[in-house]
Amino acid sequence: MKKLNVLVDWCDKNFSAFINEDVDGVIIVTDKTLNGLKIKLQEAATFHFEGLGDEATDWMVSGDFSFEYSYTMSAILQNALNFTTLAALSRITGIKHAQLSHYANAVSRPKQEQYNKIINGLHTIGHACLSIN
């Protein structure tokens, strides 16, 4: 099975997905939700590969491919806002609410240390929710 690397980002109130390697062109889709984005990406890839005709490789024709997603911090935070708030994440991580807002809206990108704090903070919130009996 061929794995296609997908970059998921957040831009102007939409998630976007982008593939440009191993697909004989570029595939880009947008949607308001991550689930909708993944459905659209599958449809767009299938449509794109069908359109290649004789130039399509065996894995394209057979549909023997899957997606491996990478998410920018803005996409991660925008998705997390379905389940928590930036204020809660700020309290847990010690990162100012305004700075988290900049990351969530793709105004700026966090350095690795901040990135790790945010991911750990989201995990902490998730574990706290799971521990409720």
Image (cartoon, helix red, strand yellow):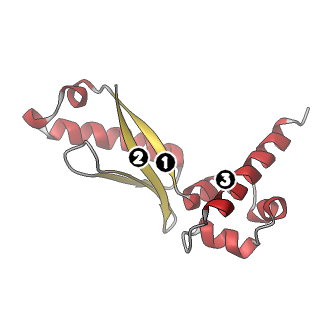
Label pair 1/2, CB-CB below 8 angstroms: yes
How packed mark 1 is, by other alpha carbons closer than 10 Å (few <14, some 14-19, many 20 or more), is some
Q: How far apart are the two marked residues, 1 and 2, measured between alpha carbons?
A: 6 Å
How far separated are the C-alphas under marks 2 and 3? 19 Å
* Dot 3 alpha-carbon crowd within 10 angstroms: few under 14, some 14 to 19, many 20 or more: some
Q: Position of residue 98 (x, y in %)?
A: 71, 75
Residue hosting label 3: 80
The residue at which mark 1 appears reads as: 70
First reached walking from the N terminus: tag 1 or tag 2: 2
Residue position marked by numbered label 2 in the rendering: 6
Specify the amino acid type for callout 2: Val
- Residue 4's tag is none
Determine whether, in the image, residue 100 is placed left or right of residue 23: right
Residue 83 point in image, percent of width and height: 72, 50
Write down the quadrant of residue 30 in the picture.
bottom left
Nearest to the eye among marks 1 and 3: give it. Answer: 1
- Give me the residue at 49% from left, 48% from top: 70
Question: Element under label 3?
Answer: helix
Q: Is residue 83 visible?
A: no
Above or below, 76 relative to 49: below
Residue type marked 3: Ala
Which residue lies at the image location 41% right of the left edge and 46% below the top edge? 6
Upstream in sequence: badge 1 or badge 3: 1
- Which numbered disc, 2 or 3, marks the residue that appears first in the sequence? 2
